[in-house]
Amino acid sequence: MSPTWIHPLRLHANPARVVVRPFHLALGVNGEGAGRVERLVADILSLDPASVRCELDGVLADFGSRHWQIEDVFDQRFQEVAANLRLQEEAIPLATRRLIGGYLCHEYSYAAAAVMNPSVVRHPDQSGLKGGSVRIVIAQRTVGEGHISSIAFREGIVTTERELTLHPAPSTATSALLVSGAHAGSAATYLARHRDSPISGTVIFPITEAQRNGLEDLRLVEFTHDDGRREWIGTYTAYSGHSIGSELLRTPDFDSFALIPITGSAARNKGMALFPRRIGGAYVMLGRQDGKNVFLLRSDRLDHWDEGELLLEPRYPWELVQIGNCGSPIELDEGWLVLTHGVGAMRKYAIGAALLDKHDPSRVLGRTPRPLLAAADEDREGYVPNVVYTCGALRIGSDLFMPYGVADSAICFGFFDIAAILAQLR
């Protein structure tokens, strides 16, 4: 078996992947956005019941087969609007309420422009599998209209024989639903997967003002707490359109999600990646605090991180512009295996690795002098040329299974022999 094998399967951008999202009317010349909504709702309320039924039937005929439980989505959208406009829900017929919701929703093609920068973790459900098989969840960054990034998921099975099967993506996707009133006073945003939508059909969109222009590069890890409890935690970059900040995604099961802003001076930077357990009583994180080097951070809280200590600096020609982590460290008997990205001449990206001491991760035991993977041949062309990038890999038997993005235009899948990686370390 070759030390490296690239699976033929690829995932590409797909404009047919759409979800229903809230439609926000543009502000008028005097900033009268709310007034436009009020007038639109008043116009719908003035329709006679026959006209309402006719219009709603037309909407359902056009879109009902394209989306999961679209009437439920319209109901939720109406409730959001009714709360803002102080409408008396019980006084409005159900068909009219749903038509109002339909007017204030639209289809959004969330992966029309690009798919990129995936990470992978073990699925919470490992039942019913044959020996050597692991059920997985892949998180991917998808880019749609307006260059807005969201988080989509894909389930599958990987085996120690380097077999990869992804579950079919459903014909329609559903955005995770906002849980209203949950944990009042908390800075977190709480979402829930639609009860009829699989994980592979769920998309998480920006919710808050800090996330307005995108949720970027989710680095997922299966985190084990001191009491043995497991939780899936991801770090991602929230982009408002003018500033960035780091946030956490936390989920016990991929049914419910909490999106939590990170506080502290380290939160202003990109590329944070959490170790999968506490070390020496502290939570530990990798980050790139100065845009060029990798730092090691420690904290007694998951949601607060300050400056850390310098861990890795560019050393080899393929990484002289900058280096950073490519996801959470992977625990081996030999130490913590860290995938790194490096940027060299002509802004060409490559992926390498480093090994950290298991008990003292500030000690670097070795680094790969040459990349494990670099942009080459057809993988150089795309939305952003000359880029290969991953946000996390997973140990499968003796292999490192790595989904990775190429040119921000497709997601590929590679198997890398761990012993061969360790043999390259210097």
Image (cartoon, rainbow, N blue to C red):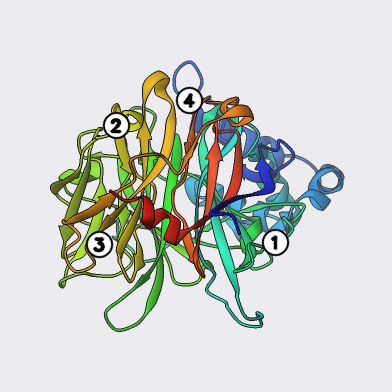
Disc number for residue 32 = 4
Question: With respect to residue 198, does 225 lie above or below?
Answer: below
Which disc number belongs to residue 313? Answer: none
Are the residues flagged by discs 2 and 3 in contact, CB closer than 8 Å?
A: no
Point out the tag, 1 or 4, that comes first from the N-terminus: 4
Q: In which quarter of the image is residue 174?
A: bottom right
Q: Which of marks 4 and 3 is in front?
A: 3
Residue 345 located left or right of residue 163: left
Q: Residue at 69% across / 66% down in the picture?
A: 196
> Which residue is identified by label 1?
165
Name the residue at 76% across, 54% down: 95
**Is residue 217 rendered to the left or right of residue 333?**
right
* Dot 2: element: strand
Q: What element carries label 3?
A: loop
Residue 395: percent from left, percent from top? 47, 65
**Cα gap from disc 2 to disc 4, whole angstroms:** 46 Å
381 lies left or right of 222: right
Q: Position of residue 418 (x, y in %)?
A: 44, 60
Q: Which of marks 4 and 3 is nearer the N terminus?
A: 4
> Between tags 1 and 4, which lies in front?
1
Q: Which residue is drawn at 64% across and 67% down?
A: 161
The residue indicated by pointer 2 is 322
The amino acid on which the numbered mark 4 sits, given as a three-letter code, is Glu
Disc 3 crowd rating (10 Å Cα; few below 14, some 14-19, many 20+) is: some
Left-right relation of 40 to 241: right
